[in-house]
Amino acid sequence: MKIALMDSGIGLLAAAAALRELRPDADLVLSSDPDGMPWGPRTPADVARHALDVARAAAAHRPDALIIACNTASVHALDAIRAELEPEIPVIGTVPAIKPAAAAASGGPVAIWATPATTGSAYQRRLIRDFADGAEVAEIPCPGMADAVEYADERAIAATVAAAAALTPPDVRQLVLGCTHYELIADRIRAALGDPEGLAFHCSARPTVAQAVRRAGAAAGARRGGGTLLVLRSGRVEELPPAALAYDEGRLLTGALSAAG
């Protein structure tokens, strides 16, 4: 089984690590766009163009499924990528886990941490309307957080997390991480919120990966992979960037985590 994941940068690490844990035998193709990132400030049409290029680079390696491990690309390019690659390659987008968070809240407050472009967008408001109707929802913009995570800038991570935590209502017990980059610093987010008892995080990586494995299995039958890792950066075969090794997910993928014990 070969599964490709795409993002503008290292936000795909959370899903890739979850996939490696679920299917150690799967061959992984990680396709990103360091030459074109960040995608957030780009127009929707420009995001779609860049995302299609990254998807095409991954598709050239004939994966059994492709995960769009990026909320921004899922919003603006999912339909275009599916139109080009399906049905030959199943394409799975990433959606913020608003539905399970609202269900777990039982009408209580839910917070959604997301990029400024996503916060208050018609896309996010539609998800809230469809899946969290009647719940109290706090939309928390997190300017600069994805970039801080991308470059493993510890000072910027601390500052942006603290700013978002200050905007989060203290009684929130259901927190949606609406950007794939944020999943890499979930421990620091929890600490910034005071590690309150009963605080549940709702992330996208694991459910997205489970869906991808199901769809890839249907396409690939019983075929197994060799657990290989191929990294494409703006179409070039390269290594993971050094910043990726600042996170457990990046070290897991390269074997450095197990080597370090």
Image: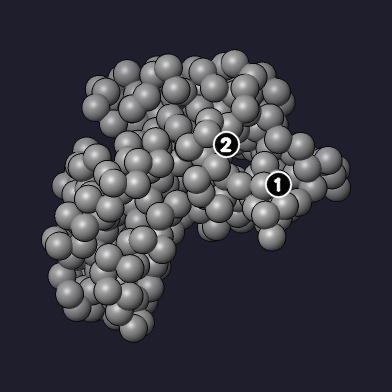
Q: Residue shown at 28%/46% (left/top)?
A: 155
Is residue 70 positioned above or below 202 on the image?
above
Q: Callout 2: helix, strand or loop?
A: strand
Which kind of residue does numbered mark 1 sit on?
Gly
* Place of residue 228 in the rendered image (x, y in percent of width and height, measured from the top left): 76, 37
Q: Callout 1: helix, strand or loop?
A: loop
Reading the image, the residue beneath label 1 is 255
Work out whether mark 2 precedes mark 1 in sequence or the reverse, and give the earlier one: 2
Is residue 3 positioned above or below 170 on the image?
above
Q: Residue shown at 34%/31% (left/top)?
A: 76
> Which of these two is toward me, 153 or 228?
153
**Callout 2 touching callout 1 (CB < 8 Å):** no
For the N terminus, the image quarter is top right
**Residue 189 lies in what quarter of the image?**
bottom left
* Place of residue 236 in the rendered image (x, y in percent of width and height, measured from the top left): 59, 16
In the figure, is residue 207 to the left or right of 177?
right
* Place of residue 230 in the rendered image (x, y in percent of width and height, measured from the top left): 68, 30
In the figure, is residue 173 to the left or right of 215?
left
> Which of these two is toward me, 203 or 186?
186
In the figure, is residue 192 to the left or right of 34?
left
For the C terminus, the image quarter is bottom right
Residue farthest bottom in this picture:
197
Q: Which mark is residue 5?
A: 2
| Real-space Cα separation, disc 2 to disc 1, in angstroms | 19 Å
* Place of residue 125 in the rendered image (x, y in percent of width and height, measured from the top left): 21, 51
Which kind of residue does numbered mark 2 sit on?
Leu
Q: Residue shown at 34%/67% (left/top)?
A: 190
Q: Residues within 10 Å of mark 2 (few under 14, many from 20)?
A: many
Is residue 31 positioned above or below 224 on the image?
above
Q: Is residue 73 visible?
A: yes
Q: Residue shown at 34%/51% (left/top)?
A: 178
Q: Residues within 10 Å of mark 1 (few under 14, many from 20)?
A: few
